[in-house]
Amino acid sequence: MRINNDNYVEKAEQVILQMPTKTKQGKTVNNLTTSKIRSLLAMTADIYNQVINSQEEQLNSDICGQIQYLRVRFVYEAGREPAVKRLVEKAELLEILQEIQGKRSNYILFSHYMEALTAFHRFHNGKD
């Protein structure tokens, strides 16, 4: 996987630090709002609650289908909002979702990565 238990926190912070962009006037702005990133986290958490209760390493087909639908939702949100698209691309969220491959431990790691992204966004002056 692109992330692991040893690097996901550092990777999340690096992604968030790379998020600000320059306007035509040269001003640095970060158009990604806390509410946007928290909505992505909320979608992730809904599935996490089911995954954490599962005792099997291989997730059932219902949960795997929900993870696939989560990818669709991330693509949709990225298409609606350029700042979300930058996050999805820089954080490699779609690729990481594909790498889960129905494994409980991989989804839990992905969920922790999303939490880290949200936390660092808030820490580094994320705003609504």
Image (cartoon, rainbow, N blue to C red):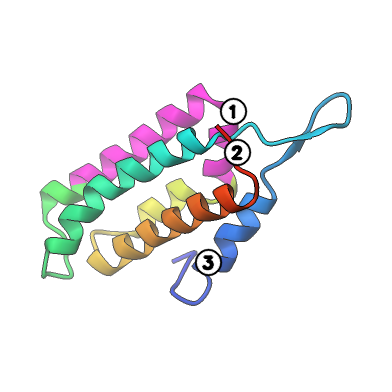
**Place of residue 92 in the rendered image (x, y in percent of width and height, measured from the top left):** 52, 51
Q: Amino acid at mark 3?
A: Val
Along the viewing direction, whichever of 29 and 63 lies nearer the viewer? 29
Q: Is residue 125 left or right of residue 85?
A: right
Main secondary structure type of the part rendered in magenta: helix
**Is 79 rendered above or below residue 43?**
above
Q: Nearer the viewer, mark 2 or mark 3?
A: 3
Q: Residue at x 49, y 31 (%)?
A: 78
**Marks 1 and 2: CB-CB under 8 Å?**
yes
Q: Which mark is residue 82?
A: 1
Q: Residue at x 30, y 60 (%)?
A: 107
Q: Which of the two discs, 1 and 3, labels the residue nearer the N terminus?
A: 3
Q: Amino acid at mark 2?
A: Arg
Read off the magenta span: 65-89
**Place of residue 48 in the rendered image (x, y in percent of width and height, measured from the top left):** 25, 54
Mark 1 to mark 2: distance in Å?
6 Å
Pointer 2 residue: 86
Task: Classify mark 3: helix, strand or loop.
Answer: helix
As drawn, the residue found furthest toward the right would be 25
Total marks placed: 3
Q: Residue at x 51, y 38 (%)?
A: 34
Q: Which mark is residue 9?
A: 3
Mark 1 to mark 3: distance in Å?
24 Å
